[in-house]
Amino acid sequence: MTVHSALSRRGGVLLATLLLAVALGGCLKFPLGDPETSRVDPSFNGVWFKRGEAGEVVLWSVQPFDSRCYLIINYTARPDGGGGWERGGFSVSKGWLSQIKGRTFLTMQAMTNAPADAPYVVALIEREGETIVARGIKPDFVKENAVESADAFARLVEANVDNPAMYLDPDRYEKTGDADAETVQTILRAFH
C-alpha cells in the first residue's frame, strides 16, 4: 500500500506538510504572488516530513486543490513513550507558487490557527532530489522595511532574493515513501 492510498483512505484526508508560525518563521500581512495566475508543480505533491531533535515529526500533506493552488495540511506529533504518537499541532492552508528571479517561493494562506491580520507564511523553496529546503522570510525583516502592501512586499523580495538577512535558517523536509507508510498512518490515527 502506498503512502498516498493509505492517507486517502483515512477519512478523505488528502495528504500531509511545518507548524506555520514556527517552522517557516512567522506570519506576514501580505502574500507573495497571485494565486489566480499560479500553477501547481506536481513534483511537490505528496507527504513531506521533518524529524525534530526530541523525536517530534512534522508532516505536510501537499495536494492540488485545483490547477493553480494546493491544499496543504500540517500535522505535528511526538512519541508518546509507549511506541505510539501523541497528537500535536494541526493546520490547513491554501498554498501557491511564485517565481522571482528564477527562484521558487511558496505562499501559504492559513485557513486555521493564524492571526486574521497576518495569515501568510512565505518561504523560498528549493528541491534537492527528494528533499525540500525551505527558508522562511523573516517577519521582522519585512517590518524593518516598512512594507505596507502586497506590491511593496513583492518588490522587497525581488530586491533581496539573494540577501541571507531576509531568510530564517533553512528547514529540510524529506518526501515520504512506502517505508514510511506505517508511521504516517499511526500519526494520522492520533488526529482522527
Image: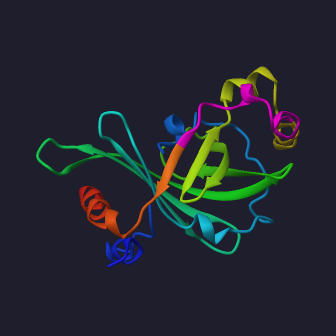
Q: Please name the residue shown 86% across and 48% down the image.
A: 101
Query: Which residue lies most toward the top here?
Result: 144
Q: Please state the horizontal and vertical placement of residue 82, each as a whole percent of the image.
A: 11, 46
Query: Which residue lies most toward the front here?
Result: 129
- Check the picture and name the quadrant holding the N terminus: bottom left
Does the image show residue 119?
no
Check residue 54 for magenta coloring.
Answer: no
The one of 103 and 136 positioned closer to us in this rendering: 103
Q: Please state the horizontal and vertical placement of residue 180, each as a whole percent of the image.
A: 33, 62
The one of 79 and 130 positioned closer to us in this rendering: 130
Query: Which residue lies most toward the left here?
Result: 82
Does the image show residue 15?
yes
Check residue 167 for magenta coloring.
Answer: yes
Q: Is residue 179 above or below residue 32?
A: below
Q: Is residue 61 above or below residue 24?
A: below
Which region is colored magenta? Answer: 156-171
- Check the picture and name the quadrant holding the C terminus: bottom left
Q: Please state the horizontal and vertical placement of residue 97, each as a whole percent of the image.
A: 71, 58
Residue 160 falls left or right of residue 88: right
**Model colouring:** rainbow
Q: Please name the residue shown 24% across and 60% down the image.
A: 186
Q: Please state the horizontal and vertical placement of residue 83, each as a whole percent of the image.
A: 14, 50
Q: Is residue 80 above or below residue 35?
A: above
Q: Please name the residue shown 56% across and 67% down the image.
A: 45
* Tally of marks: 0
Res. 169 image quadrant: top right
Residue 119 falls left or right of residue 114: right
Q: Please name the residue shown 57% across and 52% down the image.
A: 132
